[in-house]
Amino acid sequence: MIREQGEVVALVPGGVLVETQRASGCASCSSQKGCGVRVLQGVFGGRRHRVTAQTTLPLRIGDRVELVLPASALVHAALLMYLLPLVALVVGAVIGQIVFHTNGAAILGSASGFVLSLVLVARLQSATHRQGRFAPRVEQVLFRAAD
């Protein structure tokens, strides 16, 4: 289980909107100045992130909570986001090369496979979001907000 702490900032149907503090390993990494991740974090700003979490607990705005997400959900999402487009790109290139016997067709096939995989990923992500299968849930209340 992946655990994260955050503060409830809004109540939504079936859950809450929780603001978490983004953790970064940049401070302890040996390649601080040459890393693109650090640059991207600086460009896209903010170390805060908002996420909708499922809960049945009676919460109020300002409550400090612990969120949990099954590790399998993170692995599934990573495979979906990274592996599926890569496989589609290669398969598209192979199909283009086999069918038309030209490098141009292989390039066009790979681009088509990649774009189609992105459409598929977006639809699958939308479906899993509606089902709430990979949504974090509030495990416990750490601190109650003052009245």
Image: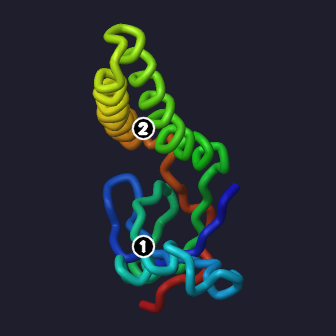
Task: Name the foreground residue: 111 vs 74.
Answer: 111
Quarter residue 51 falls in = bottom left
Residue at the front extreme, as displayed: 102
Kindly identify which residue carries mark 1: 49
- The structure residue drawn at horizontal position 47% and vertical position 54%, both measured from the top left corner, is 54
The quadrant in which the C terminus is found is: bottom left
Residue ID at (32%, 55%): 13
Q: Position of residue 146 (x, y in %)?
A: 47, 91
Question: Against 61, is 4 above or below?
Answer: above
Residue identifier under label 2: 128
> In which image quadrant can residue 123 be found?
top left
Quadrant of the rendering where the N terminus is positioned: bottom right
- Asked whether, in this view, residue 120 is left or right of residue 91, the answer is left
Which one is earlier in the sequence, the residue at label 1 or at label 2? Answer: 1
Question: Can residue 85 be seen at all in this image of the molecule?
Answer: yes
Q: How many labels does the image show?
A: 2
State the image quarter where residue 98 is shown.
Answer: top left
Q: Is residue 94 above or below residue 139?
A: above
Measured as percent of width and height from the top left, residue 139 is found at: 62, 62
